[in-house]
Image: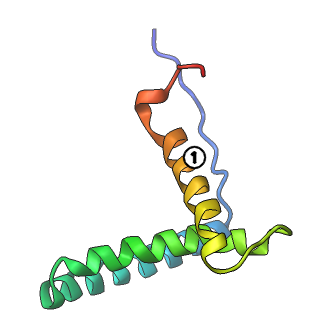
Amino acid sequence: MSKHVEMQSGLKNRHIRILSLGSAIGTGLFLVSGSTIQTAGPIVLLGHALAGVVITLAPMTRTPDFRSGAMALPLWLGALAAALDHATPHTAGKTR
């Protein structure tokens, strides 16, 4: 007994355009990163990781209790540690 299921298209033309634009940008970044890593070495990956951390922590500078300089570093590192702790699979299902 096979059941015929009718599928519908839920994506509009603008969604397809955004997906294709994101794919083109991602492909370009991937290719440029590969040639950069070949030229400069694996230290480029560290630069990408550092940029990711900075981009992740940048919104914290917009909080009302923002502190500058070394006083903010423990706050930022604490938030990063909390985010990493919640992202690790070994803590799934455990309660504290």
Dividing the picture into quarters, in which one does residue 46 lie? bottom left
Residue 4 in the figure: left or right of residue 8: left
| Residue at 52% across, 50% down | 81
The kind of residue tagged 1 is Ala
Residue 79 in the figure: left or right of residue 52: right
Dividing the picture into quarters, in which one does residue 68 lie? bottom right
Residue 60 percent across, percent down from the top left: 70, 68
User: Is 9 rendered above or below residue 23?
Assistant: above
User: Is 88 rendered above or below residue 79?
Assistant: above
Residue 63 percent across, percent down from the top left: 80, 68
Q: Tell me the colour scheme of the image.
A: rainbow
Which residue is the extreme one toward the bottom?
A: 39
Would you name the residue on which mark 1 appears? 82
Dot 1 lies on which element?
helix
Which residue is the extreme one toward the front?
A: 71
User: Is 54 rendered above or below residue 91?
Assistant: below
Q: Nearer the viewer, residue 6 or 18?
A: 18
Which quadrant of the rendered structure holds the N terminus? top left
Residue 83 percent across, percent down from the top left: 56, 49
Dividing the picture into quarters, in which one does residue 18 lie? bottom right
| Residue at 86% across, 69% down | 64
Mark 1 nearby-residue class (10 Å; few <14, some 14–19, many ≥20): few
